[in-house]
Image (spheres, rainbow, N blue to C red):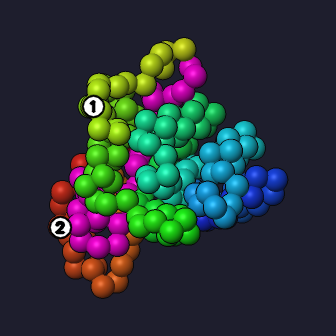
Amino acid sequence: MEFGVCVATKVDEIGYITHAENLGYSHAWIADSQMIWSDCYAVLALAAQQTRTMKLGTGVAIAGTRIAPVTAHSIATINRLAPGRTFLGIGTGNTAMRIMGHKPLRLKEFAHDLRVIRALLQGEEVEFTWRGQTSMIKLMMPELDFIDIEHPIPIYVSGFGPKAQALAGEYGMVGDVNPASAGFYGAVFAQCHLWC
């Protein structure tokens, strides 16, 4: 059995991540809340350099605060530092968006972001719509080792309601466990498209 730890991101106090690795924890989920804590990708970069076996990722990245190509590029950069040990946890941003006085990302927009992120992390060209314009995009020059998309990056989608959990089944690995919808998980897992 594996155990992980989810931590608040304080860029100058990350020794607890290596301590957790030394205690046998397998995963560190680094929180993303831009109005409260340090930047999650800065903390992940430092943790990647200070750990050897622990899997590192966002817990969870906020789709509404960074556009999809930026999120894909950021986690692929971390994967360059910790190849094969990187994952992306991602959600609509309930806390991070509401603290700025905004609603979380709508599920239609979230689905678009998930589709774009997954395609980019798989090295594919994908249609991306932003500010009313649509274009084909692709992560450029991965062979020059600025990023790593050669080692698969699992996507874990946070979702509390049935529609968000369906997105988890379509685009990610698993949704958040909500006891009220535990019976729904059979359907979610039945449609999971595991790609890592």
Q: Which of 49 and 53 is in front in this view?
A: 49
Q: Residues within 10 Å of mark 1 (few under 14, many from 20)?
A: few
Instruction: Please say whether residue 150 is visible from this viewpoint.
Output: yes
Horizontal and vertical percent position of residue 104: 41, 64
**Left or right: 195 with respect to 7?**
left
The residue sitting at 31% across, 60% down in the picture is: 106
Q: Residues within 10 Å of mark 2 (few under 14, many from 20)?
A: few
Image point (73%, 43%), residue name: 46
What range is drawn magenta here? 145-171
Q: Looking at the image, is mark 2 or mark 1 nearer the viewer?
A: 1
Amino acid type at circle 1 is Thr
Q: Nearer the viewer, residue 66 or 119?
A: 66
Please report the residue visible at 51 percent of the width from the left and 68 percent of the height from the top: 101
Q: Choose between 133 and 143: the one closer to the eye.
A: 133
Q: Nearer the N terminus, badge 2 or badge 1?
A: 1
Name the side, left or right, on which 88 lies relative to 126.
Answer: right
Q: Is residue 141 above or below residue 1?
A: above
- Expressed as whole percent of the image width and height from the top left, the position of residue 53 reads 63, 46
Count of number-bearing discs:
2
- Is residue 143 one of those drawn in magenta? no
Q: Mark 2 points at which residue?
A: 187
For mark 1, give the secondary structure: strand
The type of residue carrying mark 2 is Ala
> Which residue in the structure is indicated by mark 1?
134
Taking the spot 30% from the left edge, 85% from the top edge, the residue there is: 180
Query: Between marks 2 and 1, how big is the CA–CA gap?
Result: 33 Å
Q: Which mark is residue 56?
A: none
